[in-house]
Image: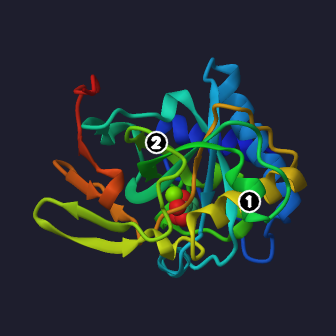
Amino acid sequence: MTDLAETLDRAACEARAVPQSPPGKSLSLDDAYRAQARVVARRLERGERPVGLKVGLTSEAKMRQVGVREVILGRLTDAMQISDGGFVDLGRMIHPRVEPEVAFLLSRPLPPTSDPASVLACVAGVAAALEIIDSRYQGFRFDLGDVVADNASSAGFVLGPWHPVGTDVGDIPIELALAGETGETGSSAEILGHPLRALAEAGRIAAVQGIPMAAGDVVLSGAATAAIPLRDGAQVNARFGALGHLTLRAGFGARTTAT
Ligand code: OOG
Ligand code: MG
C-alpha cells in the first residue's frame, strides 16, 4: 500500500488530484497530523526550509465553504512564498484558490495557552497576507483528517511589510477583489473574533501534536473570507485597512520571476 504522505506529496509535485479517504475510513486526528509531518518532511528532504505555520478554518465563511468545522494547523516552507505583486503559475497547481489573512511574526515560540497576553508577548510584527490553497483532493473535497494530512491545503503565501506589534488588528476591514469578478469582503474580526485567538490555537495544536516552531516564524491566522478560485489571467487586489494592500497575478507559463 502506498503511504498517504507519499501519495499527497506526489499529487502536489505532479499537480494531479487524488481521491479522499473512502467513506468510513476517516483518519484519526493524531494519524492525520503524523501524515502531515511526513508530507512536510519530504519537502524538507528536497531542501525546502520551514518558515512558519498556518492556522486554518478560523472563520465561519471558511468553515461553511469547505464543510469542516475544526481549527487546523499546517506548516509553511520558504518555497511557498511569493512576493507581493508576484505571479502564480497555474501549471504547477491543481485548482488553487486565494484568500485574505493576517500574518504574525514570532519573536519566540508560542506557549500552549490561550491567554491573550502571553500570546501577544510572542509577537514581533503583524502584516497583511494572501494565502494560496490548493487541496490535493479531487473536487477540493475532504474531511478533517484528509485536510490535516494534506498540510491544510498549503500551497503558497504572500506577505506585506511588517507593522509594529501595537497595530490593532482586531477589526481590520478586508477586501479581496479579482479584476472582472465579484470579490469577497470581511473583517479580521471574523477570524475567531480576533486574529490573536488564532495564534493561541496555533500554540495549543502545536503543543498537542508536537509541531515545531521558532523565533522568526510567520503564522498565518486563517482566512477572514471564503477563498476565490484563481483562474488564468486572474489579477488579485486585496486591501487590508491600516495593513495596506497586496496584489498577485495568476496564469499559465514561465513568468515565474515575480517582482
Ligand atoms: C483548508 C485550509 C483552510 C484557512 O485559511 O481557513 C485555510 C482549505 O480551505 O482547503 O487555509
Ligand atoms: Mg488559509
Q: Is 184 situated above or below 73?
A: below
Front residue of 11 and 77: 77
Q: Is there any visible trace of residue 32 in the rendered image?
A: yes
Task: Using a 10 Å C-alpha cutoff, classify the residue at mark 1 as few (fewer than 14 neighbours), some (14 to 19) or many (20 or more).
Answer: few
Q: Where is residue 195 shown, x and y percent of the image?
A: 57, 64
Amino acid bearing label 1: Ala
Secondary structure beneath label 1: helix
Residue drawn at x 73%, y 43% is: 5
Residue drawn at x 70%, y 21% is: 45
Residue drawn at x 20%, y 60% is: 178
- Where is the C terminus found, in terms of image quarters? top left
Residue drawn at x 29%, y 27% is: 256
Which residue in the structure is indicated by mark 1? 117
Image quadrant in which you'd find residue 50: top right
Q: Is there any visible trace of residue 148 in the rendered image?
A: no
Tally the marks: 2
Q: Is residue 125 left or right of residue 47?
A: left
Task: Using a 10 Å C-alpha cutoff, classify the residue at mark 2 as few (fewer than 14 neighbours), some (14 to 19) or many (20 or more).
Answer: many
Q: Is 259 situated above or below 163?
A: above
Front residue of 218 and 242: 242
Which residue in the structure is indicated by mark 2? 156
Spatial separation of the CA atoms under disc 2 and disc 1: 30 Å
Mark 2 vs mark 1: in front: 1
